[in-house]
């Protein structure tokens, strides 16, 4: 599924983020930046040990913030590492941190002149954020950003499971129909 947001494109696909050819891919990391399971493990395996070596020099990352490294062996030139919140029930502060993880990732991309970014669904694995709650937050944040900064030409959400894909598809359908 693909929609136009001004001159930019927002895409949803089902797949593996490590295989994406966007200029940057986003990692759903933890505050140590020293690796983990899920997307984080997959990205480190595909990028090779040089990625962990660079992450070690960064001194971690706060929840809701993002940092950028090289893509090493990946097709993507950069990896943007962001840390989403651990979900302990719906609250404005948890939602704000999820929003911030997407926002800061795009700010870091823009600062490097990156024009295309692929995101996983941050916080919806080990960190337990329900997909139905996370999808509209993720989509609205990205849409708001590219409306302001059309130099980000393409944002692709790469959803691992068919359930995640369908949930994002339904949320995007609801958001786009609000405007018409
Ligand atoms: N491509 C795209 N999406 C994926 C992939 C992949 N290769 N693999 C998993 N997902 P998670 P979190 C989906 O747990 O919830 C790590 O250990 C997965 O189905 O990777 O932010 C970190 O080090 C889920 O929907 O990230 C942290 O400790 C989504 O990616 C912690 O997990 C996010 O799941 C971060 O937890």
Image: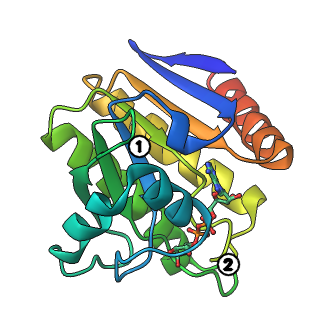
**Which one is closest to the eye, mark 2 or mark 1?**
1
Q: Position of residue 155 (x, y in %)?
A: 46, 31
Look at the image and tell me in which quarter the C terminus lies. top right
In this view, the residue in front, 18 or 178, is 18
Residue 101: quadrant of the picture: bottom left
Q: Earlier in the sequence, mark 2 or mark 1?
A: 1
Q: Residue at x 44, y 60 (%)?
A: 44
Local crowd at mark 1 within 10 Å, few (<14), some, or many (≥20)?
Answer: many
Of residues 50 and 40, the one nearer the viewer is: 50
Q: Taking 8 as reference, is 170 above or below it?
A: below
Q: CA distance from mark 2 to mark 1?
A: 27 Å
Q: In what element is the residue under mark 2?
A: loop
Indicate left or right for 125 with 31 as reference. right
| Of residues 52 and 167, the one drawn nearer to the viewer in this rendering | 52
**Which mark is on residue 180?**
none
Residue 153: horizontal and vertical position, in percent?
A: 35, 21
Q: Return the residue found at the far bottom.
A: 88
Q: Report x, y in % for residue 177.
A: 71, 25
Q: Are marks 2 and 1 in contact (CB under 8 Å)?
A: no
Q: Quadrant location of residue 145?
A: top left
Query: Would residue 150 appear left or right of 170 to someone viewing this image?
Result: left
Task: Give the side of residue 178 with respect to residue 85, left or right.
Answer: right
Location of the N terminus by quadrant is top right
Q: Is residue 180 above or below residue 111?
A: above
Secondary structure beneath disc 1?
strand
Residue at x-position 34% and y-position 75%: 33
Residue located beneath label 2 in the image: 90
- Camera-nearest residue between 81 and 178: 81
Q: Residue at x 37, y 81 (%)?
A: 31
Label for residue 25? 1
Whether 147 is drawn above or below 126: the answer is above
């Amino acid at each position: 599924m693909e929609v136009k947001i001004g001159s930019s494109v927002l895409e949803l696909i089902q797949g593996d983020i490590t295989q994406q050819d966007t200029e940057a891919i986003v990692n759903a990391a933890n505050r140590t930046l020293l690796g983990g399971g899920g997307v984080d493990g997959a990205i480190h395996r595909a990028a090779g040990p040089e990625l962990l070596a660079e992450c070690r020099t960064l001194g971690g990352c706060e929840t809701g913030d993002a940092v950028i490294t090289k893509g090493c062996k990946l097709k993507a030139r950069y990896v943007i590492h962001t840390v989403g919140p651990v979900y302990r029930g719906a609250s404005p502060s948890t939602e704000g941190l999820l929003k911030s993880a997407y926002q800061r990732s795009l700010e870091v991309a823009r600062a490097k002149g990156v024009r295309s970014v692929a995101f996983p669904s941050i916080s919806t694995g080990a960190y337990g954020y329900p997909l139905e709650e996370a999808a509209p937050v993720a989509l609205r944040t990205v849409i708001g950003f590219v409306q302001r900064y059309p130099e980000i030409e393409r944002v692709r959400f790469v959803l691992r499971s068919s359930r995640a894909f369908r949930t994002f598809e339904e949320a995007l359908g609801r958001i786009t129909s609000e405007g018409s």
